[in-house]
Amino acid sequence: MSTKPLKILIIDENLVRAAILEEGLRDCGELDVHHIREMDGLLPRVAAINPDVILIDLENPSRDTLEQMFQVSRWAERPIAMFVDRSDSDAVEAAIDAGVSAYVVDGLRRERVKPVLDVTISRFNAFHRLQRELREARSALEDRKIVERAKRILMERNGMTEAAAYTRLRRTAMDQSRKIADIARALVTAAELLGPGEGS
């Protein structure tokens, strides 16, 4: 089964600089390249193209222009490389905060486009994998906490041992084809509605 070529969006008002990017992209194999030259109404136009990767090229960006590009970055959640002629530490930090995967200062040359594209996609994927793992770890921790609270409720209100309380939760979850944490959360919510006696 054939896969669709990667859809690349170039955002650049300068035709000469955009041409350099397009030449560099030719070294990357088959790609579906789009180009936005006007900055007005940028977000809906980016959304209409729905690219896989965004390359933003800014010669001497003003703060307003940078902020507009950072809005695109925050909204898009795609691999984004931003090429600028010069920058400062505040702009770099703002780019990172906005989710720009590669911020390239004074580096717009045809031979650099492919390596930058590869790094941009790789960094984006690594960052989002770490984010997913962090969310999963936080979720698992919250689940453990809620199960512990539910066990305490059963132990205090029913005089059960910790093992018996956990067995009750597990059996109820199995009977209802639900997660133990979901049963525990429902029990804690019910105990909070019923008032004192839950334990903390």
Image (tube, grey):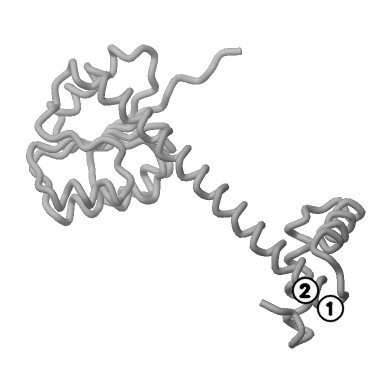
| Image quadrant in which the N terminus is located | top right
Q: Quadrant of residue 48?
A: top left
Q: Would you place residue 146 above or below residue 21 in this image?
A: below
Please identify the quarter of the rendering in which residue 165 is found: bottom right
Mark 2 residue type: Ile
Circle 2 packing at 10 Å, graded few (<14), some (14-19), many (20+), is many
Q: Is residue 173 left or right of residue 54?
A: right
Q: Is residue 40 left or right of residue 179?
A: left
**Given contact means CB atoms under 8 Å apart, are the residues at marks 2 and 1 in contact?**
yes
The residue that label 1 is drawn on is 157
Mark 2–mark 1 Cα distance, whole angstroms, equals 6 Å
Q: What residue is shown with label 2? A: 153
Residue 5 x/y as whole percent: 45, 19
In the displayed structure, 118 sits above or below 97; it is above
Identify the mark at residue 98; answer none if there is no mark.
Answer: none
SS class, disc 1? helix
Q: Is residue 200 above or below residue 122?
A: below
Q: Nearer the viewer, residue 15 or 173?
A: 173
Q: Residue furthest right?
A: 175
Q: Amino acid at mark 1?
A: Arg
